[in-house]
Image (cartoon, helix red, strand yellow):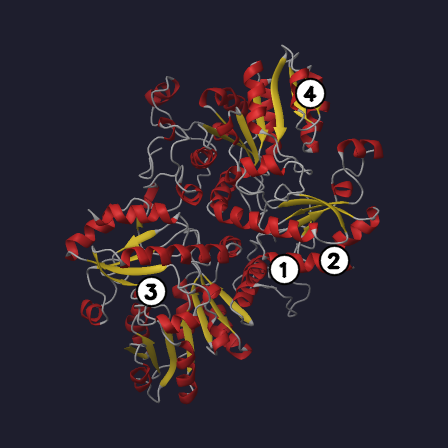
């Protein structure tokens, strides 16, 4: 990295003394002195990059001269954001995709061949599950699911065809917390790579690579970008392990536009502040709900009542802005009435942005599932998922209070 | 709703047509009308644009005003205010003001026959004596730039009432997070929105906010007639920036306070100008006028003269050497050579802007990182 801020990030171990999160969010990955001396990075919209002459092409092919070639293989602005995210995550190499799903698909398709197996903890984003069950299966990849955080069950299904262990942490929407040390150790012991989707945690709260996990993945649409106004995904891992993923992305083409990249870079600048606030607001709203007579149960890792509170406390700096809760003695309609009665959060899927969002998983994501499937996935009719934005916690709590009276 | 909640939601209604949680960016230059001569809400983008209107609604709410106007730069906004005056009329302005404002007041307005007196607002009796029968406007900045002088805005409102003149405050340094001049009786609030409001060093913009509807109509007439409006893309980026305004400003104030205390106790520093220090002459007023923080701009003079000053500003690594302020990145500069170079040299000195003065804009970086950076630069 060519900044005055720190030398090449690959020279030092990510575990060495880091700069503060906010300093990294603002500066990491950026050149100190930029083109035209501008303080912000330019938005480079070029679809292709010109060569001065034939020798320049030959130098590029012989890798004497690292540079851009064609927009699908990368963009200078994208590399800045990739370096920034790699530094925040304490990893060597980050790779951006046009969405979180494109990121996981890109990684799975790179790592898995016909006959291979992948093991998932079963609490996961339903589209990730759908991609494995409906699409990877067509290529002869076998997906095995075991109960979330059941490490013995995970270890038991690993065989010599197993190539990847996958989990979210925290999981969505139950917010179970994976013991990352244990999860990574299974992979190491069995010689299988491990992936954590840490979208809900963010590198502010936990950095899975520090526990020996091979890859960390984010829907950067959420907390990293943070403004509900762009889609992006990212995978971070070692240089060596990421190289084939980058090559496949160049072929598949799920890349970000230059404009999108700039908005992402700009969003990350306030990442530390937003996370600090969302951690605080999440905790306050979760405590309010936990003490409310109309609430049956609150899923939030920052509450002592949460089954994984101990692991969370040990590994996480804060618990994020996402809260899932069950309304006491409410059918789906009574639950929907509460969602509809809130006035600050917008009713929408997604999470992690500055605006609070609210949804009823039954309606938003599992409407077309059979009741048995919903039971299996742990999605009761009276479940609400609330993503705290950065509004004042007092406002969000007052609004929830009136909605619960409605 | 509280300030931060309004920054996120006022002016950002869900898009009725698509449900989009973030309002669309309207780029159209013109709007199709249903009937000749019967104008709908929007006609031509200079006169109004839905994206700019959203931003203006947010700004009006945050400054506790009724209406706002967004401009292509802070200077365009200031110019619009000064165009309320006519030939033969007079402005009294504080002496601790932005160099660009000084230039506009002295080298452009004089061509239209509008005259200006610069007077320190520290001595308000002297300030009041500068008012003449031709005076129509008091132009104030608090904290002032670059000396961080604090102007008692309530007292200025009382003076203005006695003389029947308008008051305008450049609230760029304080931001509505800390000070809302309209609540104190000020007539016009102006911002270089490029700074804290946008907050990311990537958008030029200006804003005017007022409480009085008639005054708004007069200012709108000038803006529409002269055309320095904010573009749709910049309006969008500005609205996006406002959503984190309070978080940014509060964090930046906390860090600035700690840096000021660090510098104040350091023998390599001659003096520190920061309203959050109890030794600052405006501290007591600032404590009343600024809500929970003293801003994130501070100036200091280094022991060792001009050469040493130059070495210090050129030796920082996190603080980047550049004009402007208020963004996520920390900046450092030497006002005499940079932000206030457009002052006449004699005026600059008489207003206390010495060559040894360094001004810093504290960004979002961690305090420890910034302190260490200043510490090493001061040894340069």
Mark nearer the viewer, 4 or 1: 4
What residue is disc 3 on? B277
What residue is disc 1 on? A395
What label sits on residue A153 in the rendered view?
4
Question: In what element is the residue under mark 3?
Answer: loop
Q: Is residue B126 above or below residue A313?
A: below
Residue B43 rendering spot, x and y as whole percentages: 59, 64
Kindly report the distance in space between the C-alpha atoms of the residues bearing marks 4 and 2. Answer: 41 Å
Residue sitting nearer the eye, B166 or B361:
B361
Q: Is residue B148 above or below residue A193?
A: below
Q: Quadrant of residue A59?
A: top left
The quadrant of the rendering that contains the N terminus of chain A is top left
* Label pair 4/1, CB-CB below 8 angstroms: no
* Side (left or right) of B103 relative to A404: left
User: Residue at 39% across / 46% down in the picture?
Assistant: A40
What residue is disc 2 on? A403
Kindly report the distance in space between the C-alpha atoms of the residues bearing marks 4 and 3. Answer: 61 Å
User: Residue at 69% across / 55% down in the picture?
Assistant: B16
Q: Is residue B28 visible?
A: yes
Query: Is the residue marked by circle 1 packed among few (<14), some (14-19), or many (20+) residues within 10 Å?
Result: some
Q: Quadrant of residue B354?
A: bottom left
Residue B144 rendering spot, x and y as whole percentages: 34, 68
């Amino acid at each position: 990295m060519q900044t005055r801020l720190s030398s090449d990030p690959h020279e030092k171990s990510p575990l060495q003394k880091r700069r503060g999160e906010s300093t990294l969010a603002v500066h990491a990955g950026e050149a100190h002195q930029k083109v035209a001396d501008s303080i912000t990075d330019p938005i480079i919209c070029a679809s292709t990059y010109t060569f001065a002459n034939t020798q320049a092409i030959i130098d590029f092919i012989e890798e004497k001269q690292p540079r851009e070639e064609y927009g699908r293989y990368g963009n200078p602005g994208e590399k800045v954001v990739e370096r920034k995210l790699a530094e925040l995550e304490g990893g060597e190499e980050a790779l951006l995709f046009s969405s979180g799903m494109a990121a996981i698909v890109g990684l799975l398709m790179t790592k898995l061949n016909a006959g291979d197996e992948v093991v998932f903890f079963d609490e996961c984003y339903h589209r990730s599950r759908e991609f494995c069950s409906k699409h990877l299966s067509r290529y002869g990849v076998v997906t095995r699911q075991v109960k979330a955080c059941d490490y013995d069950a995970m270890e038991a299904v690993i065989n010599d065809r197993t190539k990847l262990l996958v989990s979210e942490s925290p999981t969505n929407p139950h917010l179970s917390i994976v013991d990352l040390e244990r999860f990574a150790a299974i992979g190491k012991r069995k010689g299988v790579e491990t992936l954590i989707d840490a979208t809900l945690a963010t590198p502010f709260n936990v950095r899975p690579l520090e526990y020996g996990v091979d890859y960390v993945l984010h829907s950067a649409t959420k907390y990293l970008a943070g403004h509900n106004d762009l889609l992006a995904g990212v995978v971070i891992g070692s240089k060596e392990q990421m190289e084939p993923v980058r090559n496949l992305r160049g072929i598949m083409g799920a890349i970000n536009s230059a404009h999108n990249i700039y908005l992402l870079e700009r969003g990350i600048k306030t990442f530390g502040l937003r996370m600090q606030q969302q951690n605080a607001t999440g905790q306050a709203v979760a405590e309010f709900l936990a003490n409310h007579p109309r609430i049956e149960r609150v899923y939030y890792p920052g509450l002592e009542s949460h089954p994984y509170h101990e692991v969370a406390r040990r590994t996480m700096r804060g618990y994020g802005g996402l809260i899932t809760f069950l309304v006491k003695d409410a059918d789906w309609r009574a639950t929907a009435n509460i969602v509809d009665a809130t006035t600050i959060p917008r009713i929408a899927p997604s999470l992690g942005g500055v605006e609070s969002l609210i949804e009823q998983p039954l309606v938003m994501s599992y409407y077309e599932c059979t009741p048995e499937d919903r039971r299996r996935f742990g999605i009761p009719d009276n479940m609400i998922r609330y993503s705290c934005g950065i509004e004042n916690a007092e406002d969000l709590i007052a609004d929830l209070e009136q909605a619960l009276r409605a | 709703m509280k300030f931060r909640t309004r920054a996120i939601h006022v002016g950002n209604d869900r898009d009725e047509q698509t449900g989009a949680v973030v309002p669309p960016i309207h780029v159209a230059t013109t709007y199709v009308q249903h009937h000749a001569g019967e104008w709908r809400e929007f006609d031509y983008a200079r006169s109004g644009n839905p994206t700019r209107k959203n931003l203006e609604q947010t700004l009006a709410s945050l400054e506790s005003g009724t209406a706002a106007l967004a401009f292509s730069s802070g200077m365009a906004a200031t110019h619009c205010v000064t165009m309320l005056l006519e030939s033969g009329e007079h402005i009294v302005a504080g002496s601790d003001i932005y160099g660009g404002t000084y230039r506009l007041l002295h080298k452009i307005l004089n061509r239209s026959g509008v005259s200006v007196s610069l007077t320190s607002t520290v001595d308000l009796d002297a300030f009041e004596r500068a008012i003449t029968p031709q005076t129509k406007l008091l132009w104030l900045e608090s904290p002032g730039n670059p000396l961080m002088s604090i102007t008692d805005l309530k007292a200025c409102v009382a003076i203005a009432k006695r003389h029947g003149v308008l008051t305008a405050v450049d609230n760029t340094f304080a931001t509505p997070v800390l000070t809302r001049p309209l609540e104190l009786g000020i007539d016009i609030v102006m911002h270089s929105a490029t700074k804290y409001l946008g907050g990311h060093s990537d958008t030029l913009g200006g804003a005017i906010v007022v409480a009085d509807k008639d005054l708004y109509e007069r200012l709108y007439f000038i803006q529409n007639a002269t055309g320095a409006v904010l573009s749709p893309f910049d309006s969008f980026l500005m609205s996006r920036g406002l959503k984190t305004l309070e978080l940014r400003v509060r964090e930046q104030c906390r860090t600035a306070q700690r840096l000021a205390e660090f510098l104040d106790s350091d023998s390599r520093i001659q003096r520190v100008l920061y309203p959050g220090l109890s030794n600052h002459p405006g501290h007591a007023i600032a404590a009343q006028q600024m809500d929970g923080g003293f801003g994130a701009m501070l100036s200091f003079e280094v022991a060792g003269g001009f050469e040493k000053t130059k070495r210090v500003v050129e030796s920082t690594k996190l603080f980047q050497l550049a004009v402007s302020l208020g963004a996520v990145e920390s900046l450092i500069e030497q006002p005499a050579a940079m932000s206030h170079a457009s002052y006449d040299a004699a005026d600059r000195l008489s207003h206390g802007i010495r060559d040894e003065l360094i001004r810093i804009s504290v960004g979002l970086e961690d305090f420890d990182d910034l302190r260490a950076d200043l510490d090493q630069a001061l040894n340069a």
